[in-house]
Amino acid sequence: STPGGIARTKAILEHRNHIQELVLSDVRLPQLQELASGLNGSLGRLKTLSLSCSHDMHESPTSISLPAGFLSSIAPNVQRLTLLGVLFSWGEGSPKITQFCYQRSFYPHHAPHINHDRLSHTFSDVVHTLRQMPALEKLKLVQALPESTADSQTDTINLPGLKELDLEG
């Protein structure tokens, strides 16, 4: 936790209702946790959010996530969402999302044997989420899909504008 990182996080949170684009990469875990939990209230102007954890191997993984209702009520105008090492609330989507990139772990190459049974969401949750994102043009999911599709529905997901699809692990 550096004084500069703490001051930067506080400044971002103080001005969160004016921010249209927030792109933060290689953020240390304490600052990212404070930032993620502080992204509440009205973020109606936010169009782009990209958050990624520090790759510092000395820090242990933790469960950092955006507040519940983030896409539906806190930041309903987000169009581009990238989360690397920040947990996503499956089941929640937004019709305005055009780009969604999600990587569950910030150690993808150091933990290739992710236990997909431990994922907190089901394949149906993923399907339900994607159905709420009909404007998607780019979708990238890394270590996000459960191995079992036993609970999956047979209905299709209509993504007429999808131009880029990348599913890994």
Image (cartoon, rainbow, N blue to C red):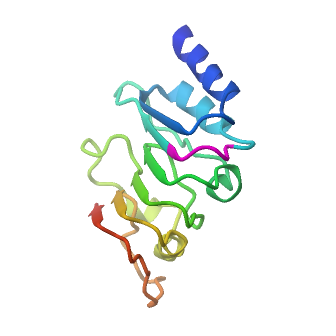
Describe residue 70's horizontal placement relative to residue 53 as left or right: right
- Of residues 45 and 129, the one drawn nearer to the viewer in this rendering: 45
Query: What residue sits 56% from the left and 67% below the top?
Result: 95
Q: Main secondary structure of the magenta part?
A: loop
- Of residues 28 and 61, the one drawn nearer to the viewer in this rendering: 28
Looking at this rendering, what residue extends furthest in the top direction?
Answer: 3
Query: What residue sits 59% from the left and 16% below the top?
Result: 6
The answer to whether residue 107 is visible is: yes
Describe residue 123's horizontal placement relative to residue 138 as left or right: right
Range of magenta residues: 43-48
Where residue 45 appears, as percent x and y from the top left, is 63, 44
- Image quarter for residue 165? bottom left
Quadrant in which the C terminus appears: bottom left
The answer to whether residue 1 is visible is: no
Q: Is residue 64 above or below residue 140?
A: above
Looking at this rendering, what residue extends furthest in the bottom direction?
Answer: 154
- Of residues 20 and 138, the one drawn nearer to the viewer in this rendering: 20
Q: Is residue 47 magenta?
A: yes
Q: Is residue 95 magenta?
A: no
Q: Is residue 142 above or below residue 109?
A: below
Where residue 137 appears, as percent x and y from the top left, is 37, 64
Query: What residue sits 55% from the left and 25% below the top?
Result: 31
Where residue 7 appears, as percent x and y from the top left, is 60, 14
Where residue 79 appears, as percent x and y from the top left, is 50, 54
Describe residue 126's horizontal placement relative to residue 106 as left or right: right
Query: What residue sits 24% from the left and 44% below the top?
Result: 109
Looking at this rendering, what residue extends furthest in the right direction?
Answer: 41
- Image quarter for residue 52? top left
Q: How many marks?
A: 0
